[in-house]
Image (cartoon, rainbow, N blue to C red):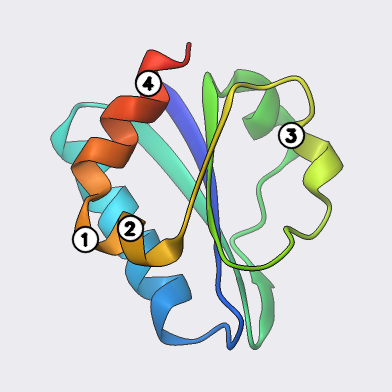
Amino acid sequence: MKIVAVTACPTGIAHTYMAATALEKAAKKLGHSIKVETQGSIGVENKITAKEVAEAGVVIFAVDVAVKEEERFKGKPTLRVEPQKAIKNATAIVEEAVKLV
């Protein structure tokens, strides 16, 4: 399954990127493709396109702050968790997200 995700934390440094890496590893391990957009202290990186949103089965928000341009994901099944949970339990988060489809 194709998954898109956004990670962001209040400072936009460590947890943002640690959550992104954890989700990427877990999705690949489970046989899914994933693109993770980070919204950190240096702005939005690896921005998810409208085409990628359209092709995705589910969206994961691993965030402690508001998602920039969240309306891009309207209508998609969405799982929202704290970045810390994504870091510690990324496999369980990906499995839970896939069940939403």
Q: Earlier in the sequence, mark 4 or mark 2?
A: 2
Residue wearing tag 3: 73
Q: Amino acid at mark 2?
A: Lys
* Amino acid type, residue under disc 4 in the picture: Val
Residue 13 circle label:
none
| SS at circle 1 | helix
Q: What's the mark number on residue 85?
A: 2
Q: Earlier in the sequence, mark 1 or mark 4?
A: 1
Check if mark 1's residue and mark 4's residue have beta carbons within 8 Å.
Answer: no
Outermost left residue: 29
Q: Nearer the viewer, mark 1 or mark 4?
A: 1
Badge 2: few (under 14), some or many (20 or more) residues near its Cα, within 10 Å? Answer: some
Q: What label sits on residue 98 in the rendered view?
A: 4
- Sequence-earlier tag: 3 or 4: 3
Q: Which mark is residue 88?
A: 1
Crowding around mark 1 (Cα neighbors within 10 Å: few <14, some 14 to 19, many 20+) is some
Residue drawn at (85%, 40%) of the image: 71
Q: Position of residue 76 (x, y in %)?
A: 67, 22
